[in-house]
Amino acid sequence: MGERIEWVANRLPASDDRYLGIMAPEQVATARAFHRTFPQYAPTPLADLSEMARHLGLGGLYVKDESYRFGLNAFKVLGGSFAMARYVAQRTGRDLADVTYGYLTSEEFHRNLGQVTFYTATDGNHGRGVAWAARQLGQRAVIHMPRGTTDARRDNIAREGAQVTVEELPYDDCVRLAAREAAVDGNGVLVQDTAWDGYEEVPSWIMQGYGTIASEALDQLHELAVRRPTHVFVQAGVGSFAAAMMGALAGEFSDRPPVFVVMEAASAACLYESAAASDGNPHAASGDLRTIMAGLACGEPSTVAWDILRNHADAFLSCPDWVSARGMRMLAVPLRDDPAVTSGESGAVGMGVVATIMSDPSYAELRAELSLGPDSQVLLFSTEGDTDPDRYRRVVWDGAWPSDVRP
């Protein structure tokens, strides 16, 4: 099988948890109310994999399928669009409740705001979401992508009308490039989904936008008579999405939060390495960050996200590429009456992780640490569909990145 899943239980010293409030229930409700004003809005499906749950020895297994989000095949448009709305409200002095899709696409909006250019760096999905939202608003977007970006991911963004460049730089340096360009553009705004000292507001707004996913998932679980998930497995790049899900669900279940597990690509496991360092500080990942999980290929943690994760995650996992590939195949070819889920490389790692933990005896210690078993109600997030169709087919059709373990 090659490399193993590495893990570390969270034994980090707690901080003052000052960022948890950005994902309070009322903040999540505000973001979802904004997204509901979009004509393209509809809750994405929650796949109930009851047969797979029984096969693996779980009480329930649920996958939030973000491949349906706004026709963009990934979730990140939720964060970028809400951050843009909050920026517009702040700049124009309007109440956020009045900054609806209708207003953002109106002549009045263009008279009040003028021409703005939104800058960002991306591995693919975030940039596409920013580009799509900018086009809806009649604004410009400049997107920088890291070396190794596939043509499919670049073209997805270019089709939204953005100016796209693929730089001979790693992801984190593309972030710095976008920040520099926005700073010298008199009408430029950086919409980046990672935070650092002095740049926390916009990333916090982006995280709030992601909260719509958690809100929808809870409604859908309730429809299935599941009061609360006992376990939440969530993938991470810089950590903003993971922290958003964790913060939103911790706020909903403050008396008895789920077990939260953070999963990263092994070559870009900055949060795992930060947890393993045990000093409470964020640490950058070393190496070239090469992984099929392009959306997770980020080497430096978001400071806002890290503060939430260090206080609320139960374990951090570093996952080789075969884990994600395995999850992709399992979701694409379900058991009996379970629905199929088209899940891309960054979306399927949770399925691969849960199947491996439950079926491979060598992970018995991790299974016990997480208390996974027949009473567990497990929530996963498939954050993208086949955003790179050629690679998706290589994995699902041709068996690329195989493992030798069968659940």
Image (spheres, rainbow, N blue to C red):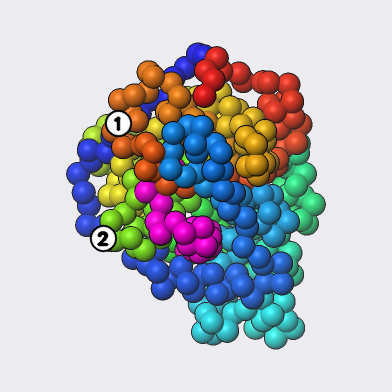
Q: Residue at x 68, y 54 (%)?
A: 68
Does 45 appear in magenta?
no
Residue 173 visible from this viewpoint: no
* Above-or-below relation of 305 to 272: below
Q: Give the range drawn in magenta.
A: 207-233
The rendered magenta stretch, by its main secondary structure, is classed as helix
Distance (Cα) linking label 1 and label 2: 22 Å
Q: State the SS at label 1.
A: helix
* Horizontal and vertical percent position of residue 357: 42, 28
Q: Name the residue under label 1.
A: 368
* Residue furthest left in the image: 13
Residue 374 visible from this viewpoint: yes
Corner quadrant of residue 259: top left
Q: State the SS at label 2.
A: loop
Q: How crowded is mark 2: few (under 14 residues within 10 Å), some or many (20 or more)?
A: few
* Horizontal and vertical percent position of residue 174: 57, 43
Q: Which residue is drawn at 43% across and 29% down?
A: 358
* Horizontal and vertical percent position of residue 258: 34, 50
* Above-or-below relation of 303 to 208: above
Q: Residue at x 62, y 20 (%)?
A: 401
Q: How many marks?
A: 2
* Residue type for callout 1: Ala
- The mark found on residue 255 in the picture is 2
Marks 2 and 1: in contact by CB < 8 Å?
no
Corner quadrant of residue 285: top left
- The mark found on residue 357 in the picture is none
